Image (cartoon, coloured by chain):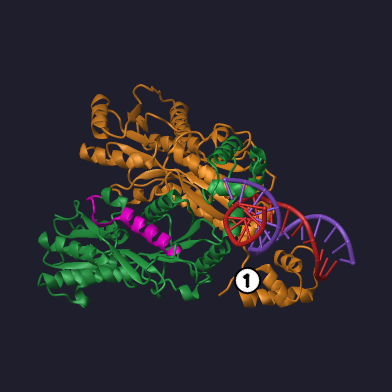
Chain colours: A orange, B green, C purple, D red
DNA sequence: TTGTATGCGTTATCAG
DNA sequence: CTGATAACGCATACAA
């Protein structure tokens, strides 16, 4: 199966290359007769557009770059999958770049993406706030940031789930289920979404007339030493009867640790996480969590990116996507 | 930051475009002086190769397509991630195509990939055997198949973990741990890897002088009705004391079902799965499993694909990657 | 060692 | 409604 060009199609259908191009792109005027003729030849030959040539001529690559910190994380994978699907339907192909949370790799990817002339960029979270001014990127490439707030916001759109509300609702769920002393478990370093979640936790306590003391009601955990830290904390504050974990990865770890310490979940301590990881449905007990609406997140992202590409964007915008509570066995 | 072309660089460094091209690609002869001069200008301007033009000229796109059935599946995501990382280091960008197990989408993707002039293709598993003759693809594109055997093997390389050996080892592990009546749980429709696993199970029984009866020692499960089916089976064959599940998704479901039926794992029934899903470490009890070597799988895949692209491939080859046992609490 | 000229396949401009 | 022509940026054959 040889590769036909527009010239070949032109010859075979007895018209000029220009006309073939017009027919293909349904652009300009031509008679119905020539249209049919050309289309027939295309059908026969199996002609396919050469995108390298088209890109070169049009200064448009019909491909979008997606920067993601870790594609093997279920949340990111699902999000990317949906973004990719929508983009494909719109005629774009997606170049997924797994930055592995490394700034070096991120820069290398950006350079490659610029070189390939991508039409737009989606930046999903990352180790630190994305800084377009530091990036090896023509400032003209439209980009949209998801989940983590970029350093500059004037020339982009920032889209995130409503982390604040999710944390607020989760905390109120604990209170409504009888928790007298709920705490929040988190890492020492908080991302922008983590900060939002912390605020939601605090405000839910305040609104329900509970005290909040950062010294005693926040359980800071590092990657190691989780079990002893938890043990020490519970020894010091045995009244603790509810934990809101900043995400499910941490919640799952806490659940194991609590079980090992002989604490009954939810009877003695209720637990709720964030992200609705599929894991949650397979722990014992199953884990309550805050669920982000990935479909909407993906749709809004693509909508805004395509608008930006077509110069119809409102920049500097910040969009918040609603979340829902998925209550399971780890809460009463 | 404008976009410089080779012509611009040529002017700025006082040489011809051809010379600049030679320097960039370190190809042909030129004096050290001009080399330095040109490189300096490139550095200053931040010149970047236009890949659309390069691709058009060279009939090479420096991008690779990857067909994957479901990127939100952890096994596939990790595999793709590693393949992408290796390819990037080799100067290729990866277009990941999530086929969602749909032949229609698969065809649409193949057409797009052909249109973009990809240099090679990786096909990871899929609903049925990949059939190059059915594909809307120039027969000249080199491709490598992972995990599931393609229909034609003459013009490709087939790479898979040693499913047979993994099943064999898992079954022997059950026997060595005292199982008198191990069975295998599987779906009605088996993929090529599933068939391999079934053979491994059978042969391990034979080698250890156990009987194998397909009627009574295979537990066929559909997507629904798993709990009642399991219950009925155990009522009929109460001596069952070990289950090898065709994969972890099924194993996790079985574990829940067994727990609901009041069966103690591993005391009364031992359980082992396949794929070493991260989930396995968070179930109660934790789940034993067969682990595929993703790193090696990815490396061998890329090696073979690049060889094929450079016309140094041996086609019709089939490569098997070793597996290891990850024994946890669900086996004694 | 270097420069000139050509063409990759496409679309856009302009003329008819 | 249609055709000729130029140009996108690059690599290469050929000439010098």
Total marks placed = 1
User: Which quarter shows the C terminus of chain A?
Assistant: top left
Q: Is residue A99 magenta?
A: no
**Left or right: B120 with respect to B208?**
right
| Image: magenta residue range | B284-309
- As rendered, which of A234 and B110 lies closer to the eye? B110
| Residue B14 makes an appearance in the image | yes
Q: Judge left or right: residue B261 versus residue B5.
A: left
Task: Classify mark 1: helix, strand or loop.
Answer: loop
Above-or-below relation of B97 to C3: below
Displayed quadrant of residue B198: bottom left
- Residue B319 falls in which quadrant of the image? bottom left
State whether residue A29 appears in this view.
Answer: no
Label 1 sits on residue: A4
The answer to whether residue B154 is above or below residue A230 is below
- Horizontally, is B138 left or right of B306 in the view? right
Q: Does residue A217 sit above or below A96 in this rendering? A: above
Depth check: A126 or A165 in front? A126
**Residue at position x 17%, y 60% from top?**
B269
Q: Main secondary structure of the magenta part?
A: helix
**Residue B284 % position (x, y):** 24, 50
**Closest to the observer, A190 or A251:** A190
Q: Position of residue A282 (x, y in %)?
A: 31, 51
Label 1 environment density (alpha carbons within 10 Å; few <14, some 14–19, many ≥20) = some
Q: Is residue B303 magenta?
A: yes
- Label 1 marks a residue whose chain is A
Q: Residue at x 46, y 37 (%)?
A: A103
User: Does A54 sit above or below residue B130?
Assistant: above
The percent coordinates of residue A184 (x first, y second) are 37, 31
Nearer to the camera, A163 or A310: A310
């Amino acid at each position: 199966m040889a590769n036909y060009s527009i010239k070949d199609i032109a010859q075979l259908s007895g018209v000029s290359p220009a006309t073939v191009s017009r027919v293909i792109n349904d652009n300009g005027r031509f008679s119905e007769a020539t249209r049919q003729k050309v289309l027939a030849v295309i059908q026969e030959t199996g002609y396919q557009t050469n995108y390298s040539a088209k890109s070169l001529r049009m200064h448009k690559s019909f491909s979008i770059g997606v920067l993601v910190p870790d594609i093997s994380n279920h949340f990111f994978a699902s999000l990317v999958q949906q973004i990719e699907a929508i983009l494909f339907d719109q005629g774009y192909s997606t170049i997924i770049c797994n930055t592995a949370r490394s700034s070096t790799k991120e820069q290398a990817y950006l350079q490659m993406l610029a070189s390939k002339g991508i039409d737009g960029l989606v930046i999903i979270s990352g180790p630190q706030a994305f800084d377009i001014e530091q990036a090896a990127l023509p400032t003209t490439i439209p980009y949209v940031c998801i989940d983590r707030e970029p350093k500059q916001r004037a020339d982009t759109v920032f889209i995130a789930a409503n982390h604040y509300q999710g944390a607020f609702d989760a905390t109120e769920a604990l209170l409504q289920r009888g928790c007298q002393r709920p705490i929040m478990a988190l890492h020492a370093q908080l991302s922008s979404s983590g900060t939002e979640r912390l605020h939601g936790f605090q405000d839910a306590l305040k609104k329900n007339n509970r005290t909040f003391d950062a010294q005693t009601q926040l359980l800071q955990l590092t990657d190691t030493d989780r079990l002893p830290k938890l043990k020490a904390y519970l020894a010091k504050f045995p009244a603790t009867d509810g934990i809101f974990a900043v995400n499910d990865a941490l919640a799952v770890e806490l659940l194991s640790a609590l079980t090992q310490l002989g604490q009954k979940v939810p009877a003695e301590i209720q637990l709720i996480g964030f992200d609705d990881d599929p894991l949650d449905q397979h722990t014992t007990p199953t884990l309550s969590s805050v669920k982000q609406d990935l479909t909407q997140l993906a749709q809004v992202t693509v909508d805004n990116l395509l608008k930006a590409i077509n110069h119809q964007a409102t920049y500097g915008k910040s969009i918040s996507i609603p979340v829902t509570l998925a209550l399971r066995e780890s809460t009463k």
